[in-house]
Image (cartoon, rainbow, N blue to C red):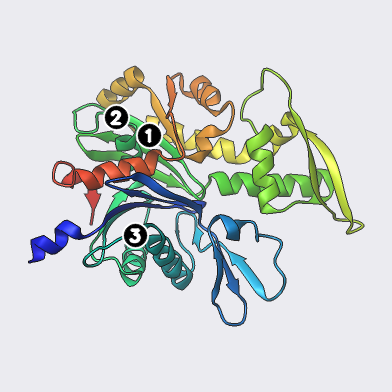
Amino acid sequence: MFGFLNFFRAELAMDLGTANTLIYTRDKGIVLNEPSVVALDAHSENFIAVGSEAKEFLGRTPHRIRAIRPMRDGVIADFEVTRQMVSFFIRKIIKGFHLGRPNIVICVPAGITQVEKRAVIEAARQAGVRNVLLIEEPMAAAIGAELPICMPKGSMVVDIGGGTTEVAIISLSAVAYAESVRVAGDAMDQSLQRYFQNEFRLQIGENMAERVKKTIGSAYTLPEPKSMEVSGKDMVTGTPRSVVVTDAHVRLALEEPVRHIVAAGRRALEKTPPELAADIADSGMLLAGGGALLKGLDQLLADVTQLKIVVDADPLTTVVRGTGRAMENRKKLKSVFIN
């Protein structure tokens, strides 16, 4: 009877990220890709919006509504809101007749503590999940990019998400070296906001900072200069104002977080054993995560490390695809899961 119930039980893979939550199912692949944002009634704490709709509320809410991001630096910052958000997403994608609660594999940062692991597992269980398995994000990224993780050969992964940058050296289905740096996409947005305040005396919101980063942000000099108009609030007069900024302005604003990411990659190479380092010299470095889309970052890393840099074909979904494949091949890849 237990085996019969398991046959009909849904199996999910989840990338519970600081910026976005993605869910993968065995039959349909990626079925959900939503911002990890929730809008709540400030008095009753009832959900008003979740995901893409809630993200539009950021910086635009009246006093009776709170728009929050319950994940910070890759881990749970608000347990109750995260639990309800996970439950909402699971209910949204599980349709039809399923017997019992679903099983799930969730990816987590490499530097996560035991307390933070328990928080993720407990949030999933309270959201209605039966069994929870965890996998580290860089390992999931390596599986998603189809790197030869099971072979005695070193592979290097740099996964730049919303809250953390995960750097790992992988060989024989295990992580030989890993470092989790809490500098990633969110830190870039915050650096942009500070730069506009200091340079232009202009306050801009989270969504505008992200838009500027995606449109003209770069880590390396672009072949053709780019510019865009940015709107915000004048810090002196308090009135709306717009300025025109160039890619050079944005590159200067992003210099500090980019430097931290590059430094993490160099530290990993310095601490890698010689044989694994020789393998990486042949295979290169894989870039995954939304931060991998920053223009010129691959070229900057290539100049600093003298390695071949490979950007995954779809870096935004590399981790959840790898988590899904690990779920589908649990017996073969059982050693990649963490306790």
**From the viewer's perspective, is residue 188 above or below residue 97?**
above
Q: Residue at x 73, y 27 (%)?
A: 226
Q: Quadrant of residue 267?
A: top left
Residue 301, percent from left and from top: 50, 26
Check disc 1: other Cα within 10 Å, few if <14, some if 14-19, many if 20+: many
Instruction: Please count the marks in the image.
Output: 3
Check disc 2: other Cα within 10 Å, few if <14, some if 14-19, many if 20+: many
Callout 1 amino acid: Val
Q: Which quadrant is the C terminus positioned in? A: bottom left
Residue tagged by mark 3? 95
Q: Spatial distance from mark 1 to mark 2, Cα to Cα?
A: 10 Å
Q: Is residue 254 visible?
A: no
- Badges 3 and 1: C-beta atoms under 8 Å apart? no
Residue tagged by mark 2? 147
Callout 2 amino acid: Leu
Sequence order check: which comes first, mark 2 or mark 3?
3
Sequence order check: which comes first, mark 3 or mark 1?
3
